[in-house]
Each structure stands twice: as structure tokens, then as C-alpha cells.
Image (spheres, rainbow, N blue to C red):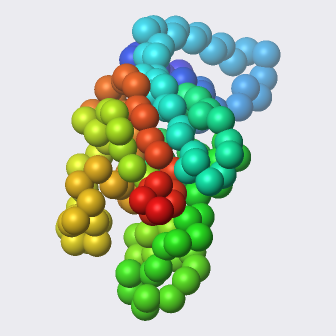
Amino acid sequence: RVSVSTECLSYDATIEALMSLPEVVSDDDEVTLTVKRLRRQPKISVKLQYPPSDNLPDASIELFAGENLRRAMLTRGIKLNDKFAERFDSGGMGDCGADGTCATCVVSVGKGMDLLSPMKQQEEQILKTKPRWRMACKTVVGFGMTEGDLTIQLSPRQWEI
């Protein structure tokens, strides 16, 4: 007899636990499944504001607590490469691949800073003169499994022109 606890797991963790059950090999095998309290994943409503020069309307997306901001926006078709960004490590141009050195994914947070994971030392040093800015590649939304509303400006350097 095999037992798997699914109580108060997220949807993905519940499915993973169910998939770990051994395969039924004979008609004599018995599987009893009891699923209790599936936990709802907290959601973050994100209002995206594009630079005026892009001539794009504001957009809204919904993210789940625990998602990386950069990855979540890219998978939803939101472009992040700021054409005015210079790499912190080399001063050159180009995407660093989420290493936190190019700052092409920087966003400005207008509302909901408390919903984001705390900055680590590298991000703090790079953005020390811009307290409302965050590197999307180093930011997790819904910090502490919280939910709420987040407003961000994409490509904040373009807003300063």
C-alpha cells in the first residue's frame, strides 16, 4: 500500500505527488486517493506601462506568486530589452541572459514594491541611485505568497528622455 499526502499543496505540487504514485500492474491492486484542501496560488495583477515613445496602450497581465518577473513577462510576450541600457559589467550593449549585469530588463515600480522579493547586494549596488527600479531577472513577484496590484513602467530610461 502506497500513501501520498496532497493536503494543502499547490496545484502543480499536487499533480507531481499524484504522478509519483506507482503504476497499477494488476486488477488486484487498489488505489485509494484522498485529496484535501488544494491551496489556491496567490495572484498578482500587473499593470504594464510602455514608454510614451512606443505609442502602445497600457496592458495588464496576471502573474502567480513565486514567478520570476522577467521570465513571466517574456513567456507572456512582453518585450523587455531597453535600447538605452548599458551593461554594468562591460559597459557594452546586449542581454546578459538573466545574470543581472546588463540591466536591459530593468523596470520602474510605481505601485506594489512590497509584493516583490528583497533586493540582493548586486542589484542594490547597480541600482543604488534609482530606488524605484528593479531588475526583472532578479525579482520574484508575490514575495511571502502575497497577492495584490503591481504597476510597472517598462524601459524606464526611455521615460527620462
- Residue 151: tell me if it is visible: yes
In the image, 131 versus 17, the foreground residue is: 131
Side (left or right) of 27 relative to 131? right
In the image, 95 versus 20, the foreground residue is: 95
Q: How many tags in the picture?
A: 0
Residue 92 screen position, x and y as percent: 50, 88
Residue 135 screen position, x and y as percent: 40, 59
Side (left or right) of 117 relative to 148? left
Which residue is pictured at 43% across the width and 9% down the height?
37
Which residue is pictured at 39% across the width and 50% down the height?
108
In the image, 137 versus 130, the foreground residue is: 130
Residue at the limit of the structure toward the front, as seen here: 161
Which residue is pictured at 22% across the width and 65% down the height?
129
With respect to residue 40, does 2 lie above or below? Answer: below
Which residue is pictured at 58% across the width and 10% down the height?
32
In the image, 10 versus 43, the foreground residue is: 43
Side (left or right) of 118 relative to 36? left
Residue 153 screen position, x and y as percent: 47, 46
With respect to residue 38, does 53 lie above or below? Answer: below
- Residue 71: tell me if it is visible: no
Residue 106 screen position, x and y as percent: 44, 59
